[in-house]
Amino acid sequence: MKYLLLLTFIFSSALAAPSQKSKTELESELVDFNKIKDVIKSDGLEDVARKKSLQALASKKKRLEKNISRYNFPTEEDFWPFVSELWLVKNASILKWDMKKPDYGLNKSFEYYLKSVGVYEVKFKILLVDSPNITHFSLPFKKNEFLFLISVPFIRTMDLTKLEISTLLFENYIRSKKGFFKQMALGKDVSKILGTNFHGKKQKSLIVEKTLKKYDEIILGKGFNFQQQFKVTKDMERVLKNNMKLWNSYFSLLKKIDNLVKSNSLYETYTKIYPSPELQLNWLKPN
């Protein structure tokens, strides 16, 4: 308080004094002010002021860093589950995944199937949909975790057994492991910015929408090409051929699908997505 009164007195005196001051008066004020600085230093107030300044600077830096972090794009690992789940929500009216689901016991059946072909420690989710528009699919998801869609009308129309359904899921698992969906859905421009920060740059707000359109294109229209389907089919052959039960279930499944797409107009677009059951059967026949 004494320092504040002293400073107030000096500045009040300066305002009240005439504009012209003698050299002696100026020297006297300078001496008084220097004395005040000495008192401040001796009381440690200068260090306190410096610390407060540094604390304020650190707080400002922290706020700035937090603000900048808001402009981080997700990494590719975080990007896929986000976009896949968003796509499911946006297409809920088409997929009808909120239906009352029958208990097919698919989780246990598929888990047993994976173990029988030597695949362990894999997490998966099976989402049943009440739509013939999407027969079966594996969407990009978390690392070492798979998200499968499978149509209940598709299952019922062909009267698939649990073993055949698990075989179909495993084919989707193989396709997902090969990364075909990701390769088609992830444009080069999107790939470059994942995991980066766009603070101070033009915001890439259309990236998610662009990727969602790719999802629509792949799942509802374009599907996979012959080369991709051939690789999946030959991988299935390599894995299943030593287990006759599983091998026969794959043949049985493909024959049922082939008959379905040839006889039921509701599924005539199936071969645009997965070309084609008839070709797959030919690829699997011994030369």
Image (cartoon, rainbow, N blue to C red):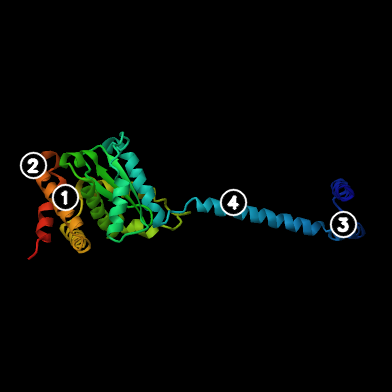
Give the secondary structure at mark 1: helix
Considering the image in quadrants, where does the C terminus appear? bottom left
The mark nearer the N terminus, 4 or 2, is: 4
Type of the residue with mark 1: Leu
Q: Which mark is residue 263?
A: 2
Q: Give the CA distance from mark 2 to mark 3.
A: 100 Å
Type of the residue with mark 2: Ser
Residue 44 in the image, given as x and y percentages of width and height: 83, 59
Residue 3 in the image, given as x and y percentages of width and height: 87, 51
Q: Give the CA distance from mark 4 to mark 1.
A: 58 Å
Residue of label 1:
253
- Is residue 182 at all visible to an observer of this figure? no
Q: Are marks 1 and 2 in contact (CB under 8 Å)?
A: no
Q: Give the CA distance from mark 1 to mark 2.
A: 16 Å
Residue of label 4:
63
Corner quadrant of residue 225 = bottom left
Q: In this view, does 158 lie above or below 287?
A: above
Q: Give the CA distance from mark 4 to mark 2.
A: 64 Å
Type of the residue with mark 3: Ile
Residue of label 3:
36
Q: Which residue lies furthest to the bottom in this view?
A: 287
The mark nearer the N terminus, 3 or 4, is: 3
Residue 146 in the image, given as x and y percentages of width and height: 33, 52
Point out the frontmost of discs 2 and 3: 2
Point out the frontmost of discs 3 and 1: 1
